[in-house]
Image: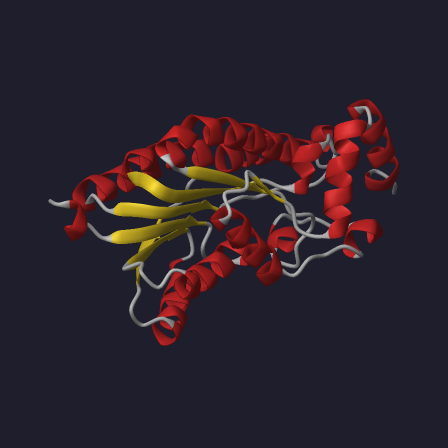
Amino acid sequence: MSKKDRKRIALITGASSGLGRCFVRQIGERYPSLQEIWVIARRRERLESLRKELAFKTPGIKLRILELDLSEQTSFAVLSACFREECPRLRLLVNAAGLGHAGRIGEQQLDEICEIIDVNCRALMAVTRICLPYLEKGSRVIELASGSAFAPQPGFAAYAASKACVLSFSRALQEELRPLGILVTAVCPGPVRTEFFRAGGISLSPVKKKFLADPEQVVRRALSDSAKGRALSVYGFPMRLFYLAAGVLPQGFIARASSLVLLKK
């Protein structure tokens, strides 16, 4: 199959809700040359409603639904098979799937901790690796990290550690792919107004509630930073300030200060 005959696609994980869903909507409008957007999530009914929405707004782009649970190893084999069969030109990859649970490590269930690592780290890296042969010069990769990646967060330790892993992975991948003309952007927002917190049974502290960001704005900034080839996308002045502080202040000091806020009963 010649290059011109191969479909131009984008792939978004975690597309059924939150930032992932916002990415699908905005990518459809921002990249009209795409022929398909492949979306991955567990809730098919959510993806079907998204298909109808996209068909109305951008009828030239089809939505391909991949109902997969990225915490399951078998999902990677299914995704690999889809790529081998279609051999598409992957112009944009967005790894937006993620989850988190709050609480002290000793109070969390072991399966909750493992699931955070499985989805936020293992699945993100696996999907990225599967996609690499189908990226080409000019393609973009967007990895959803978090402002939590900048410093340890007592009471949110496993999640913050998993996102620090994503940030480190993204920065290394950026340098590995740069010679190929493929650019990687790590997106590190603070708390965003989505159902993420409710799904994880997380009660936001009064401090975080003050800085909830609009998901559409976070995604708009991420796509803009990606288009400009920036390795990091940080939305909002408070989070940019935290990023700068985390680069200057000792991590132990930040962890101690965070514990006074996040672990306060």
How many badges with numbers are in the image? 0
Q: Nearer the viewer, residue 145 or 222?
A: 222
Q: Is residue 100 depicted above or below 153 in this figure?
A: below
Q: Is residue 18 visible?
A: yes
Residue with the most extreme bottom position:
56
Q: Residue at x 35, y 51 (%)?
A: 10
Task: Say which quadrant the C terminus sits in.
Answer: top right
Q: Nearer the viewer, residue 53 or 142?
A: 142
Q: Is residue 150 left or right of residue 255?
A: left
Q: Is residue 164 left or right of residue 178?
A: right
Report x, y in % for residue 7. Answer: 22, 53
Report x, y in % for residue 64. Answer: 30, 57
Q: Nearer the viewer, residue 7 or 254?
A: 7
Q: Residue at x 36, y 44 (%)?
A: 138
Q: Is residue 71 visible?
A: no
Quarter of the figure with residue 37: bottom left
Report x, y in % for residue 109. Answer: 63, 33
Quarter of the figure with residue 47: bottom left
Colour convention: secondary structure
Q: Residue at x 47, y 27 (%)?
A: 175
Task: Say which quadrant the N terminus sits in.
Answer: top left
Residue with the most extreme left position:
1
Q: Is residue 85 left or right of residue 67?
A: left
Report x, y in % for residue 252. Answer: 81, 23
Q: Nearer the viewer, residue 14 or 225?
A: 225
Quarter of the figure with residue 72: top left
Q: Residue at x 55, y 58 (%)?
A: 220
